[in-house]
Amino acid sequence: MRTIEVQDVNVVKEGEESPIHGDLLEVVMSNVPLIDLVSACRVSKSWCYAVLSSLFHLKKLKPWVVIHTESTNSVSKRMTHAYDPRSNTWVEIINSPLNHFGTSTLCSSGSSTLVYKFSNKELTFSSDPFHQNWTRISPPTVWRVDPIVTQVGRHIIVAGGVMYFEEDPLSVEMYDMDTSQWSTCQSIPDILKDSSTSTWLSIASNQTNLYVTQKASGLTYSFTPHANTWSGPYDLNPDPRVFFSAIGFVGDDLILAGLIGHAENVKSLKLWKINPELAEFNEIAEIPAELLEELKGESWNFSSISLLASNDFIYIYKNSDSKVIIYCEYVDGVWKWGSVKNMVWDETRIKDRMVMSCTRVGISDLHKAMNSGKCRFSVKT
């Protein structure tokens, strides 16, 4: 393990020329982990230019996976790690602000960078890449357990998970981040009454809409905050052999991942680009057999997956065992599969909870995080 310190890389003295420069320096920078490029920018103007030029020619950066772990014995004991697929590098984020926000359980929306903590006293959430900045607000008026929580544009949506003694079991509330006000919305459709929690629903959101899908059936509805209305139902079942579905947005496209077969004998995993309103399904990729075996692992039962997506990049992992994270990337018109060992997984701490999010990270995000004084980054080899 090595810790990145910005001041330690100023190896070129002021006024001196770097022995590597021009196109060669840019090529070198294109192979340097993103976390190290922050320090390289401080070496000299020519190095900074080479860094920015190398990133410009990449066209787009691959989204990182950020993994928070907390002990089931003490939720105040938390650790944060991140995976950068561009350089196949794991990074530990030390002294994360997560450790300063009480003992409520951390959760992920599953559809965006949003992570949150929910209690009867407050709702605390963060949507920046490394979750350095947190917003504390009053909780919704209805008490909930395992609700859907996600961000749609400038709104935080909290839906379902309502306790049995509340008047409306399908209640939806919305927090406007511009006005700092909660409002009551149209309730979740009645047909989802028995599955109105994040346990049974997969969700995907963008700047305008929230989609909720029954994981077991593919039954889907969409919610539009500015109109305060639900639309649907839509039948998102592109293959009758699919027994489990998960959805997410890749850019502007809504993607569905489906497990084919049954829990005791998963035959395949496929990806579809879908248009719920027009009932259009376009199969875009099928997992290679060897990667399906990696995803299955040693367990005989394989009943569910989670999907994280952003920027033409999809991560998939098994909920019961995330030792391996499968990814699918859109490159030059083709979806390409791969896998990475989850370095955070530790057999000796198998009871620890893991909360994952997927986020776009640029060098400006790293600059900001490093200069904030709130955390340090330690690259793990």
Image (cartoon, rainbow, N blue to C red):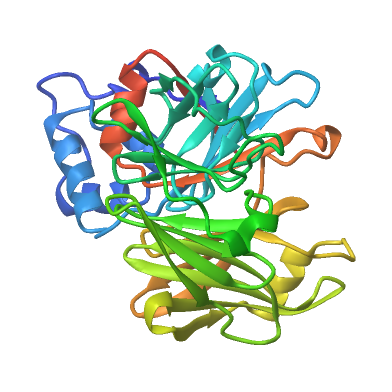
Q: Hey, which residue is sitting farthest right in the picture?
A: 300
Task: Answer with left or right where residue 195 lies relative to residue 348.
Answer: left
User: Residue at point 54% right, 15% down?
Assistant: 101
Do we see residue 325 in this rendering? no
The quadrant of the rendering that contains the C terminus is top right
The residue at the point 29 percent across, 38 percent down is 363
x and y percentages locating residue 33 in the rendered image: 41, 43
Q: Is residue 369 left or right of residue 266?
A: left
Q: Position of residue 133 (x, y in %)?
A: 38, 23
Q: How far across and down, in percent of the image, does residue 316 sit?
A: 60, 60
**Which residue ends up furthest to the front in the rendered image?**
167
72 left or right, relative to 224:
right
Front residue of 334 and 106: 106
Q: Looking at the figure, which quarter contains the N terminus?
A: top right
Occupied quadrant, residue 277:
bottom left
Residue 127 versus residue 330 in the image, above or below: above
> Is residue 299 left or right of 60 when viewed as pictured?
right
Task: Please identify the quarter of the rendering in which residue 164 is found.
Answer: top right
Q: Give the total of numbered labels.
A: 0
In the current view of this chain or complex, which residue is farthest to the left?
15
With respect to residue 286, does 140 lie above or below? Answer: above
The residue drawn where x is 53% and y is 68% is: 220
x 41%, y 24%: residue: 132
Q: Position of residue 218 (x, y in %)?
A: 60, 72
Does residue 312 appear anywhere in the picture?
yes
